[in-house]
Amino acid sequence: MNNNKPSKKKIPYPVNTYLDEYLFKYNRRTELPLDYKDLLRFTQAIPLLDSNGNDTHWQTVFFAPSDIDEIYDALKKIYALLKTDGDTQVHEHLEVARVDHCLYGNSKPFRVRIINRLNDNYDHYYVKRTDASRIFGLELEHLLSPDFIQYLVDGDTLVEEHIAGLPGDDFIARELETVEFNQIRIAKEFVKFNERCFVRLLGDMRSYNYVVDITPDIEGNQYRMRAIDFDQQSYEGKKRFYLPQYFKENNPIIFLGIKHMSLETVKQYQMEERSLIAARVKSSLERTQELLGIMKESQISSPEKVAMLKEELTKHHKNEVFLSCQNMGEIVLANIQLLLRKDFKQSILTF
C-alpha cells in the first residue's frame, strides 16, 4: 500500500503583492502576448500516442482558422521572450509545430513544440495556470539546486521552459541494466536528489515527476536527477511525502543503493549534498532570504497540513523549533536554518 498519495487534489494559490514585486525585481514577471485561457479556445483535439501506440495522456489541439495565425504568432513571441529576451530576429525563424494539452495534473498544462527552421532543431515550453506554491518551487529550484530555471509570469499565466532528460519512469525501465560502475553513480545521484527535495520540502517526486540527464563521461556515464513538477512545493503534511525514497515507483533505484552502498557511504553523500546546498544559499543569500521572507507571508497550504508537517519534522529532527511555525514558509525557513547550523538530521535511506 502506498501511503504517500496526495491527500486530495491540490488547491492553487494566488500570487500576493510581495511575490509579484519579487517576480518583477528579478525579471520573472513580464507582459505576455497570450493568456492561458486563450489556448482553451481550441476547437478540436486528438489523443497523442507514443511511438508504440500507447496513450501519453496528452492530446494535440487544433484552433480555428480565424484564430490560428494570431495564437501561433503569440506562441513564437513567448518562446523568444523565454529564451532570448524577446529578440525578434530569433522569432522570424521559429515555427509552431504542435500544441498539446494535458487533462491530468493540477495545472492542466499546454505544451508547445517549437521548430527552428534554420536547423530543424526543436524545443518545447509549457503554458500553465499561475500557482504561488509552484512559483516558490521553481524559484527554490533555481536558487538551491545545481540547475538554473527559466520561467515567466503574467497574471494568471505561467510559462516554463522544458527541462530536458529521460523521464524517471522510462529511465528506471530502460537504463538500470547497466554496468556496476554506472549503477553506483545512479544510486549516488538518487541519494543527493532525495536530500535536495527534503531540505527544501519539494514533494511528490515519484519517478514520473523527475527526469534523468545522462552525460557520457570518460568512464561510464554521469547522471543528474531534475524535478520537473513543482506543484507540491511545501503543500502536504506528511514528512514522507518530501522524501523520494518512500515512493514505490522509485524502489528499483533504492534496491541499487542497498546492493552497492553501505550506510556510511550514503551518509557521506548526504553530507556532501547538504554542504553544496548551504554553499548555494550563502552565494545567493540576499535573494534567498527575500524569497523565504515572502514565503512566510504567503498561504500555500492549509492550517491542517502545516500542523501535521511541523509535528512530524519536530520528531524527525528532535528539535522544537518547528512548533512555533505558523505556515509552510516558516517551516521551510526553519529546515534550511537547521542545515546552515549543521543540525539537520538526515533520513535513513530505506524503502
Image (cartoon, rainbow, N blue to C red):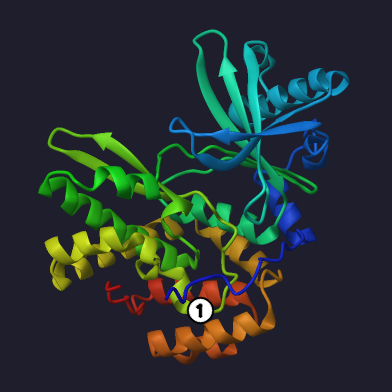
Q: Residue at x 75, y 54 (%)?
A: 20
Q: Can residue 128 be seen in this view?
A: yes
**Which of the 4 quarters of the picture holds residue 191?**
bottom left
Classify mark 1: residues with Cα within 10 Å, few (<14), some (14-19) or many (20+). many
Give residue 294's position: percent from left, percent from top: 67, 65
Q: Provide the secondary structure element on which disc 1 rests.
A: loop
- Disc 1 marks which residue? 238
Give residue 214's position: percent from left, percent from top: 30, 38
Mark 1 is on which residue type? Lys
> Which of 167 and 263 lies nearest the eye of the viewer?
167
Give residue 197's position: percent from left, percent from top: 43, 63
For the N terminus, which image quadrant?
bottom left
Tell me if 226 is positioned left or right of 260 in this view: right
Q: How many marks?
A: 1
In the rendered view, tell whether residue 34 sits above or below residue 15: above
For the C terminus, which image quadrant?
bottom left
In the rendered view, tell whether residue 346 sits above or below residue 92: below
